[in-house]
């Protein structure tokens, strides 16, 4: 498991207790010290659980961006029995920000599509820090169509701050590529399970996050825009990113309440970056359960359910409000409106 020296600001009490625990381990091995170590271990778990249970929206973003957080390639190694990568969009090139390929999960043969950010600077530059170009989404479209042709389920891992915003990306039609990916997935005749494993930013995320089941890891986020981007637009400064994060309501708890996601996968104590194997085990259990359920549903019914699921997002009601007239008034004012409309959001 990769390890970095990055300490999140709110984790300071945790690292102080861990340092104290490590110091005791190196001390003389006496019954008193062993008892103290045992007490500190229990205290460390409880402290970590308490801190992570009360994270703010911005602190959740910090966890979602942690450099040690498991990425798509980690889940490919830990969740699936086999993986054969497929490259290129057959038009322009192979975008390393999106990985695609055949995989085997127990009895299921699936197509995996996922964002990859990279670990070190060299890999991150190669992957554009997880920001895909149009050819990445066109590669995803082609591979998902291939999976549907062979009747295989699709698993998508979402982890991106957004699609690549450069000039070349715009020139090659990134907006159209994302729209095509969304449309293709919405009508694809194959079960689709999507999991937001870290960042779920903007259209870059939803481009491969249209499916029959949408899940989020506990400390991931899924949003129309990053907190910094939102703060820059509304307050003209990224200094207000904390306020923007709270206003966007993009944490797993919020989105589960709104019905945007179907499930939240619990992370290990202290976040997924502290235990890759346990996190991968929970993701595997979730995928296994969903694939067993979805593959039993007739394909026509499955596609219709998927359509209706996304169709209801953003629905609003319009009610006509009759104007009231005073009994004492002889006649209504000619210029007064006879009716008004009110729109209330269901979501």
Image (tube, rainbow, N blue to C red):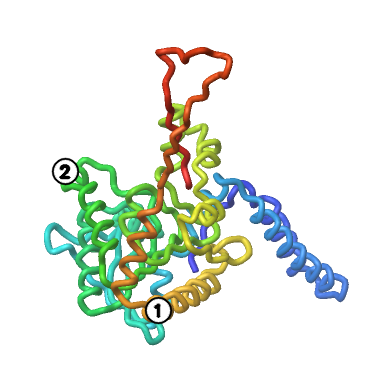
3D distance between C-alphas at marks 2 and 1: 36 Å
Residue 140: x and y, percent? 25, 63
Residue 26: x and y, percent? 74, 68
Mark 1 neighbour class, 10 Å CA radius: few under 14, some 14 to 19, many 20 or more: many
Query: Along the line of sight, which residue is nearer the eye, 45 or 21?
Result: 45
Residue under label 1: 80
Label disc, if present, on residue 133 of the rendered structure:
none
The residue located at (25%, 74%) in the rendering is 147
Among the 4 quarters of the image, the one containing residue 341:
top left
In this image, 225 relative to 150: left or right? right
Labels 2 & 1 near each other (Cβ < 8 A)? no
Residue 262: x and y, percent? 48, 62
The residue located at (87%, 76%) in the rendering is 31
Mark 2 neighbour class, 10 Å CA radius: few under 14, some 14 to 19, many 20 or more: few
Q: In this view, does 310 lie above or below 190?
A: above
In this image, 46 relative to 129: left or right? right
The residue located at (74%, 60%) in the rendering is 20
Residue 202: x and y, percent? 37, 47
In this image, 307 relative to 344: left or right? left
Q: Provide the secondary structure element on which disc 2 rests.
A: helix
Q: Provide the secondary structure element on which disc 1 rests.
A: loop
């Amino acid at each position: 498991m990769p390890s970095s020296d990055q300490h999140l600001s709110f984790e300071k009490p945790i690292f102080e207790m861990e340092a104290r625990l490590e110091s005791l381990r190196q001390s003389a091995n006496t019954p008193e010290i062993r008892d103290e170590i045992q007490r500190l271990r229990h205290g460390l778990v409880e402290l970590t659980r308490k801190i992570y249970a009360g994270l703010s929206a911005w602190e959740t973003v910090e966890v979602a961006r942690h450099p040690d957080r498991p990425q798509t390639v980690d889940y490919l190694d830990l969740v699936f029995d086999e993986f054969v990568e497929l490259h290129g969009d057959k038009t322009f090139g192979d975008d390393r920000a999106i990985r695609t390929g055949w995989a085997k999960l127990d009895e299921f043969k699936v197509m995996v599509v996922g964002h990859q950010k990279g670990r070190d600077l060299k890999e991150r530059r190669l992957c554009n820090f997880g920001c895909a170009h149009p050819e990445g989404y066109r590669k995803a479209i082609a591979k998902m169509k291939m999976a549907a042709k062979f009747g295989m389920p699709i698993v998508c891992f979402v982890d991106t701050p957004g699609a690549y915003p450069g000039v070349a990306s715009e020139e090659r039609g990134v907006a159209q590529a994302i729209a095509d990916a969304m449309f293709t997935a919405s009508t694809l005749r194959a079960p689709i399970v999507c999991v937001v494993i870290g960042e779920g930013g903007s259209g870059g995320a939803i481009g491969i996050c249209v499916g029959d089941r949408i899940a989020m890891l506990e400390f991931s986020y899924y949003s129309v825009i990053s907190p910094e981007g939102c703060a820059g637009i509304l307050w003209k400064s990224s200094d207000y990113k904390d306020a923007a994060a709270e206003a966007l309501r993009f944490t797993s708890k919020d989105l589960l309440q709104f019905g945007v996601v179907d499930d939240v996968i619990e992370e290990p104590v202290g976040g997924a970056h502290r235990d890759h194997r346990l996190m991968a085990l929970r993701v595997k259990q979730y995928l296994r359960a969903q694939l067993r359920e979805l593959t039993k549903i007739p394909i026509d019914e499955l596609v219709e359910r998927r359509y209706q699921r996304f169709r209801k997002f953003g629905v609003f009601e319009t009610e006509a409000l009759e104007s009231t007239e005073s009994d004492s008034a002889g006649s209504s004012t000619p210029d007064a409106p006879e009716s008004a409309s009110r729109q209330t959001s269901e979501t």
